[in-house]
Image: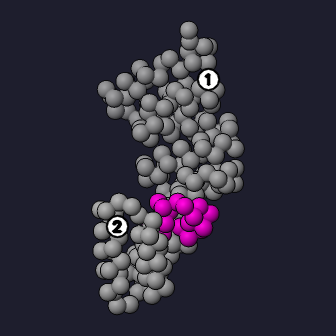
Amino acid sequence: MMSPHSSALAPLPSIIDDYRRDGDVGVLFDRLRALARSSEPAVLKEASQPYRDQPEVVIPLYEEIVARAPNDAQAMVVLANAYWLTGRGPDVVSHLATRAIAADATNRGAWHLWALAEPSVRGRVERWQRVAKEFPADQLARAALADNATSLAHDEHDPLALDLAIATYESLLAESTQTAQRLALEQTIATLRKWAI
């Protein structure tokens, strides 16, 4: 039996079906915002799960969730990620990610979005260094650090960035157990060692 809270979200699939037919994102946003205003955040989260890969559905629902649960770090991360995917811009993503970190400093998704949203390569390197320091076992953060340090070394002929990139790739190589990944890392390191900066 459907609870009163979940029955309020019963129209959600038909709203999505209508959007798939007519493609009018403005109407979709209006209908989803109206639906979200009459539902509890926890119910909205559950109902939105099948649509988590559709930012146009996630955004209006999670804007309401974040407005009503302003300390929900994971909700801010979901919304920031949807904004990122739709090209909303680094400022709004960075702002939400910073709020999410303040609410829950253990949320790695918030830290990743915070680093991604930095517009300058040098700033991204600094942010990824901070993320890698906060989460030393986070290989994805270290790979992003190495990639951004490589870009910085290339773009600005920065020898310190090159050293950082090589050292970070070497640390990833030391932990790698997959042959294909090890070969790719070894090739990258060998290429970077030949750079003349």
Which residue is label 1 attached to?
38
Residue found at x 60% / y 35%: 64
On the rendered image, what quadrant is the C terminus found in?
A: bottom left
Disc 1 marks a residue whose amino acid type is Ser
Residue found at x 59% / y 26%: 43
Q: Position of residue 165 (x, y in %)?
A: 44, 77
**Near-viewer residue (96 or 109):** 109
Q: CA distance from mark 1 to mark 2?
A: 52 Å
Q: Which mark is residue 182?
A: 2
Q: Position of residue 19 (x, y in %)?
A: 37, 28
Q: In which quadrant of the rendered view does residue 42 lie?
A: top right
Q: CB atoms at circles 1 and 2 under 8 Å apart?
A: no
Residues drawn in magenta = 128-149
Q: Is residue 146 visible?
A: no
- Badge 2, how many Cα within 10 Å: few under 14, some, many 20+? some
Q: In which quadrant of the rendered view does residue 98 lie?
A: bottom right
Regarding mark 2 in the picture, which secondary structure is present there? helix
- Badge 1, how many Cα within 10 Å: few under 14, some, many 20+? few
